[in-house]
Image: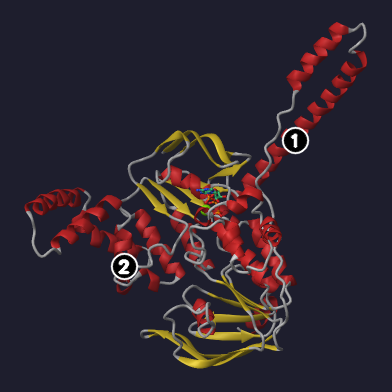
């Protein structure tokens, strides 16, 4: 059980939630919902103890498993170590112990410290940590040969499984998951749904994925109106209940306002007259009725619009015989294509099939966009005349460096733009007023994605490359992105697992399957019809 009492949190003028009291009970599975920047990750950090609330208290069980929103944070570590890090105290003790052992000479102090550390390691089941972790990984379908690899070498879907193993390490009584379905393909999401439905402790998961929430959760804690309200049922049940309650409140308010208007009219008419006692009683009535001002909902839609300064040549991109392998694993085995100006290509397929690798291959010769150390094995790539590329990478960490304000970060990409231009774009993307001055390090997942869109809106490239842009985004932003891509006149390469987006935007499909890429020159619907006819 996790009990939250009178918890409040605000940043500057922005109140995230005020005076929240909730109990999360074992056996129930909670969805934690709200638009980008609502404060979901912040609330989860308060639940886990990573962050202290400005007011109020939280009581939590001893062992809490956590999966954070940033799935790239452990890229430098070995898979097996990443799992063991789920027990922080143990991991710290193991690291310190190894550091002491690796010294050339041990002092008496070192010896004493070693004794203490061995104590901690023993208490925390450290001697079986590696085998416990391996068992968890096997259970989550991560084969033994991957256990010694680095996290950075794993594909999105595998990474989430390892991070889940980390969260589950040491049998936690509560499991806190921040957007676990990001970067997962549909099959992996279904696997996760089954898995979570069997968890017996207290589960709290953040997600923008309606289907996922509906299938997993029994309750929904929604952050809105500057508070958190718990509803029974999944996401759709919450939306229904929320609108009903809201319209009742609004109707009651309207009723009251009407009544107040009538009373005020009476008061105005007879204030100077002989009916003073009636006027006084009506004044009291007005005071009693005073409508409570309803807090505004935090749900808003950004306005995304991608334009281009000038079009590229007729052929936006041509490439031939592109090959890329990592060690013995060949990911792209000789792929060639011509992409004409204005084509919108969807790169789709299961996790780990090479979509991101193809994108990185195509960018490998472009200064500023090429990934450091990434080399192509074979192939020629020719970008079209005057092609200017805007790139939205899969991993945002590091792309938006900390230590700047949101406005300053954006301004550096076009120093000639005026302050008003910058403010205009930021406003469209819901960074209004003070929001433009907040530090880049504070951005939520969805806000970071929105800021990257701002950059593309400012630079106005004629080729847009998106690698899974809808991860982290709330429903309103996904919709706005969908419309903006449909209207964009340039060329688009779009990696996505979002079938609606692919369906409505793509004019051509590159389907990655079993080590090959199927190139279909038509929209998704036709592709599905053609492939199912062929089967
Ligand atoms: N140190 C800070 N200073 C100012 N604002 C902050 C700070 N830390 C967080 N915020 C703001 O608090 C809000 C909530 O952030 P949080 O990461 O909790 O959002 P979220 O609901 O998880 O959003 P998303 O769905 O995009 O992940 C955001 O607007 C964020 O910019
Ligand atoms: Mg978040």
Residue 366 visible, this orientation: yes
- Using the image as rendered, state which of residue 333 and residue 460 is in the foreground: 460
Q: Say which mark, if any, is on residue 78.
A: 2
Picture residue at 74% right of the left edge, 27% below the top: 291
Position of residue 216 measured from the top left corner of the image (x, y, whole percent): 52, 52
- Using the image as rendered, state which of residue 71 and residue 497 is in the foreground: 71
How packed mark 1 is, by other alpha carbons closer than 10 Å (few <14, some 14-19, many 20 or more), is some
Q: Is residue 523 left or right of residue 74?
A: right
- Using the image as rendered, state which of residue 143 and residue 473 is in the foreground: 473
Query: Looking at the picture, does residue 500 appear above or below residue 358?
Result: above
Count of numbered badges drawn on the protein = 2
Query: Looking at the picture, does residue 51 appear above or below residue 140?
Result: above
Position of residue 225 measured from the top left corner of the image (x, y, whole percent): 63, 39
Which of the two labelled residues, at mark 1 and mark 2, occupies the earlier sequence position? 2
Quarter of the image with the C terminus in it: bottom right
Q: Quadrant of residue 134?
A: bottom left
Q: Say which mark, if any, is on residue 41.
A: none
Query: Looking at the picture, does residue 238 appear above or below residue 430?
Result: above
Q: Say which mark, if any, is on residue 250.
A: 1
Query: Looking at the picture, does residue 281 appear above or below residue 357?
Result: above
- Using the image as rendered, state which of residue 260 and residue 113 is in the foreground: 113
Q: Secondary structure at mark 2?
A: loop
Quarter of the image with the N terminus in it: top left
Position of residue 132 measured from the top left corner of the image (x, y, whole percent): 26, 59
Residue 230 visible, this orientation: no
Q: Is residue 329 left or right of residue 279?
A: left
Picture residue at 43% right of the left edge, 63% below the top: 160
**Disc 1 from disc 2: Cα separation:** 54 Å
Picture residue at 19% right of the left edge, 52% below the top: 121
In the rendered structure, are the residues bearing label 1 and label 2 in contact, judged by CB atoms less than 8 Å apart? no
Q: Secondary structure at mark 1?
A: helix
């Amino acid at each position: 059980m996790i009990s939250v009492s009178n918890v409040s949190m605000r940043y500057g003028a922005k109140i995230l939630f005020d005076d929240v009291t909730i109990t999360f009970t074992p056996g129930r599975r909670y969805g934690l919902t709200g638009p980008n920047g609502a404060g979901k990750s912040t609330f989860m950090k308060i639940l886990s103890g990573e962050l202290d609330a400005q007011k109020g208290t939280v009581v939590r069980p001893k062992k809490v498993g956590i999966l954070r929103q940033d799935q790239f944070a452990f890229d430098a570590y070995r898979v097996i170590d990443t799992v063991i890090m789920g027990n922080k105290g143990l991991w710290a003790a193991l690291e310190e112990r190894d550091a002491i052992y690796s010294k050339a000479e041990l002092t008496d102090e070192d010896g004493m410290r070693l004794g203490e550390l061995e104590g901690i390691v023993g208490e925390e089941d450290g001697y079986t940590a590696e085998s416990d972790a391996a068992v968890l990984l096997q259970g989550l379908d991560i084969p033994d040969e991957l256990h010694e690899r680095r996290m950075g070498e794993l594909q999105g879907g595998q990474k989430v499984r390892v991070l889940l193993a980390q969260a589950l390490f040491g049998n936690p009584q509560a499991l806190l998951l921040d957007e676990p379905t990001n970067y997962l393909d549909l099959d992996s999401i279904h696997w996760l749904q089954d898995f979570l439905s069997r968890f017996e402790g207290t589960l709290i998961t953040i997600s923008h994925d309606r289907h996922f929430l509906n299938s997993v959760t029994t309750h929904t804690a929604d952050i809105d109106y500057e508070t958190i309200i718990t509803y029974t049922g999944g996401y759709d049940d919450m939306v229904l209940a929320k609108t009903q309650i809201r319209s009742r409140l609004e109707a009651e308010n309207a009723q009251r306002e009407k009544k107040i208007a009538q009373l005020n009219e009476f008061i105005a008419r007879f204030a100077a007259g002989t009916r003073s006692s009636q006027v006084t009683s009506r004044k009291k009535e007005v005071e009693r009725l005073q409508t409570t001002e309803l807090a505004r909902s935090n749900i808003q839609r950004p306005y995304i619009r991608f334009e281009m300064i000038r079009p590229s040549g007729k052929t936006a991109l041509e490439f031939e015989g592109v090959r890329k392998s990592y060690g013995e694993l060949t990911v792209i085995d000789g792929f060639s294509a011509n992409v004409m100006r204005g084509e919108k290509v969807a790169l789709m397929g299961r996790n780990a099939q090479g979509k991101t690798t193809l994108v990185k291959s195509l960018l490998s010769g472009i200064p500023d966009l090429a990934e450091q150390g990434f080399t192509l094995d074979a192939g020629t790539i020719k970008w079209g005349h005057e092609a200017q590329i805007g790139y939205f990478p899969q991993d945002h960490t590091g792309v938006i460096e900390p230590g700047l304000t949101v406005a300053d970060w954006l301004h550096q990409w076009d120093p000639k733009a005026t302050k008003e231009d910058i403010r205009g774009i930021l406003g469209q993307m819901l960074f209004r007023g003070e929001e433009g001055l907040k530090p880049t390090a504070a951005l939520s997942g969805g806000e970071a994605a929105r800021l990257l869109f701002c950059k593309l809106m400012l630079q106005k490239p004629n080729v847009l490359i998106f690698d899974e842009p809808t991860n982290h985004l709330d429903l309103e932003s996904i919709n706005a992105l969908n419309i903006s891509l449909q209207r964009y006149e340039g060329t688009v390469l779009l990696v996505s697992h979002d079938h609606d987006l692919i369906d409505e935007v793509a004019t051509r499909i590159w389907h990655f399957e079993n080590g090959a890429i199927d190139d279909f020159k038509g929209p998704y619907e036709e592709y599905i019809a053609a492939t199912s006819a062929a089967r």
